[in-house]
Image: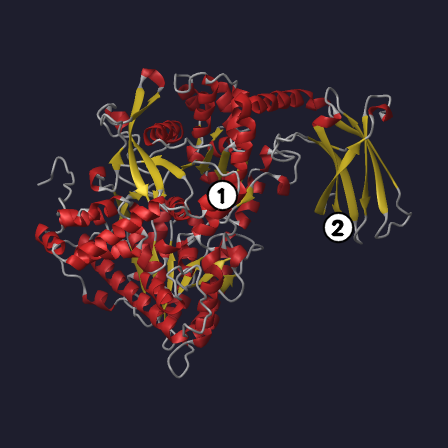
Amino acid sequence: MKAIRKFTVRAVLPDALSALGELAANLRWSWHEPTRELFAHISPEIWNRLEHDPIALLGEVAPERLEALAQDAAYVGAVIQQRDELRAYLSEPRWYQGLECDKPPAIGYFSPEFGIAAALPQYSGGLGILAGDHLKSASDLGVPIVAVGLFYRSGYFSQAIANDGWQLESYPVLDPDGLPLAVLRRPDGSAVQITLALPEGRTLHARVWQAAVGRVRLLLLDTDIPDNSDELRHVTDRLYGGAGEHRLQQELLLGIGGVRAVNAWSELAGKPAPEVFHTNEGHAGFLGVERIASLIGEGLTFAQALELVRAGTVFTTHTPVPAGIDRFELDVVERYLDTDLLPGVDAADVLALGREDGQGAKFNMAYMGLRLARTSNGVSRLHGEVSRAMFSGLWPGFDTEEVPITSVTNGVHAPTWTDPRLQGLAWERLGSADTTAVDWLSPALSDAELWRVRGEMRAQLVADARERTASAWRGQNPGGRAPAWIDELLDPTVLTIGFARRVPTYKRLTLMLHDRERLRSLLLHPERPVQLVIAGKSHPADDEGKRLIQELVQFAAEPDVRGRIVFLPDYDIAMAQTLYPGTDVWLNNPLRPLEACGTSGMKAALNGVLNLSILDGWWSEYFDGENGWAIPSADAAADGAERDRLEAEALYDLIEHQVAPRFYERDDTGVPRRWMQSVRHTLATLSPELSADRMVREYVERLYCPAAAAEAALSAQHADAARALAAWKSRVRAAWPNVSVEHVESGGVAEVPQVGDELHLRAHIGLGELSAEDVAVEVVYGRSTGGDELSDVERLQLQAEPAEQSTGDGARLFTGTVQLGRAGGFGYTVRVVPAHPLLSGAAEMGLVAVAE
């Protein structure tokens, strides 16, 4: 019999244990081990079965057990102690409060997904996990973030694997009353409701759920309410579950509705409204347009409001390929904008922000994100380079390295992803549970102790894999008895390689299967066997990704290897927290450079796992030869098949001749000393660098504080500077077609130039209606090794000579001197770019005039 409605009944706690409700209501428990231990103590069996969800635990545990614990003075004391520590954590000054800069009093952080805990399944993969880790570290550092997302009634999807290996999706409906969420309400108890005007006179309504993520507030908008029509109730049904207009509705709600939700929360909570807004990928880009609409309501024009909004906006791109960007038909977007959705805003102005060039152009969310942000970044050093090349068309005439996209390499939240056993070892031997700050090379910690703990984590993974495999088998064979071979699945003493991530084709899940006999020989090696633990979901619409999973699952089911390779279905945070620490090596073999960052290997490294990876994403900048192995990229291969073959063979060779021998080479006490040298080096060098604390500090110091300063400069005196900057830009754009480098004269060098010679330059610049103060005239020079392109480029600004020295045709004279500081080929050119104290850089306006 199926229920027509399901809901969660929350437990009534004994008075002595009422603090448990306070602890469960704040998601800090998801990374605070002492709090987690309190809940686990109530019922270890239920705690593990419910994947460490305290609210579900309190709803299922027998009242008699709670009453018994209420009589346990030691337990009650521990609960009160942790409640008091939580309150102190929420109120005491932290890193941000002591930071000496013009820091913003609040920062809005918008993302389409957030991966915080398995108990709040609002994530699909790396983007959401990264957003969740950003919030956790912001909380630990005291950064005043208010975050915004959508509440998806069915989350992403639950994955099962059919008997033939094909991925099956299901969408269990979530009950928000059974989650660590509360409705945002006014003082009279009524729920706050966000409304958006839609075409055909319709109105989209959304309630606002709020979650406490430590010190950070997360707001989630939910359209599944009676005020909406049946169609509109489904706007927030699934994460990435729709396309076209459905996706557009989600992104309008996230951006426009999200800003309105933040304003409502700020007013009700008595908190300052954000001055800086961080757009985590293009999905939330409409937040900038909503802010423009608000400023237009205060008397600014669109152009003036745009300058003010840009100043305080940070945009992060996560995709290395154009196919990863949301794009919509221009007429569809226009239909939504030609409503009362954004009062005072002309649809044409918004369309210009996202419009692509060329035939068949669409509205590009990444373009809008970049045009609405003064500061933009990729998520690893290599991804920054890729992004500058991918979006260079938005800044024509500028070299790729000048494209104004920087990079902040992702990090992961160490307390969330570091196994409690390793944290305990750090505390016991090194004096702190902060694994990112202790000295992992200290003689106070022996190789044998660390090796023992690593073995315990591997054994925990093996036990978990067996249980998950048996549970999955029972799910596909109701009433049957799981086969005996599952009890022998994997071996806690064997070299264990992990691979877990989303399954688009470029991540190459099945590269390991390229030569199946070679892989079989590695798995079944009589002296140095290897075992593989694999997990991952393919997007429901990606049949090619599903085919890769099927191929892998079918190989893993072959009787001779099924004890050495396993695919674990329904990859999520709870699985990951056992999977990462339990492996010895983390495998990552994407097509370079299509991995923007790849944080799974980071989480593994925080547990002393060595990486075996293509030099892509974060690994490209952190691989040092001791913390793992780099799989050579066969970039020069004739085609994709040849590239796969070469890189697969390199992978097999590394495992057979370097990875496995190092792991199995033991001393008289059974400890692999050389292996442990690499483990300790990994922990010592990568733990601080890969921490989300490092990442968030970078965002604050390099991006948020400068954005706050720019926003303050433009908003002062009723936005006088924003008004003036918009007028100046309009004047410069109108005059720019008449700006040119008329003539360049040079002299001062010998007939055969030598190092130390001085090159004297006189550039005659046609300025049209502009003045010399409106531009910067630069000599761009560097090494010339062939062709016309320059490398190792440097720039020197030329100085304007008095107007009376101008030539008769009205060109203005600029002069300067370049010292020849190195031997070899040398080349130069002269260019003109707009110049204003409030511009973020030479390329901001995308205008340049270069000597012909």
The alpha-carbon separation of the residues under discs 2 and 1 comes to 40 Å
Find residue 168 and report its horizontal and vertical position in percent. Answer: 26, 46
Q: Which scheme is used to colour this image of the protein?
A: secondary structure
Kind of residue sitting beneath label 2: Thr
User: Along the horizontal axis of the image, is 690 left or right of 159?
Assistant: right
| Tag 2 residue | 785
Q: Nearer the viewer, residue 357 or 804?
A: 804
Is residue 195 in view?
yes
Q: Residue at x 80, y 54 (%)?
A: 823
Question: Disc 2 on helix, strand or loop?
Answer: loop
Q: Is residue 74 left or right of residue 617?
A: left
Is disc 1 surrounded by few (<14), some (14 to 19) or many (20+) residues within 10 Å?
many
Quarter of the image with the N terminus is top left
Relative to 57, residue 585 above or below? below
Apparent side of residue 523 relative to residue 355 in the rendered image (left or right)? left
Q: Is residue 277 above or below residue 782?
A: above
Residue type, numbered disc 1: Val
**For numbered disc 1, what is the local secondary structure?**
helix
Please give the name of the residue rendered at 54% of the width and 43% of the height, measured from the top-left corner: 702
The residue shown at (46%, 74%) is: 674
Report x, y in % for residue 414. Answer: 39, 55
- Residue 636 is labelled as none
Q: Is residue 345 visible?
A: no
Q: Position of residue 292 (x, y in %)?
A: 47, 23
Q: Position of residue 64 (x, y in %)?
A: 8, 53
Dots 2 and 1: beta carbons under 8 Å?
no
Q: Between tags 2 and 1, which lies in front?
A: 1
Quarter of the image where one finds residue 374? top right
Question: Which residue is found at the position 20% from the left and 55% from the top?
Answer: 77
Label 1 sits on residue: 700
Extreme-bottom residue of the structure: 668
Q: Return the disc, 2 or 1, that comes first in the chain's sequence.
A: 1
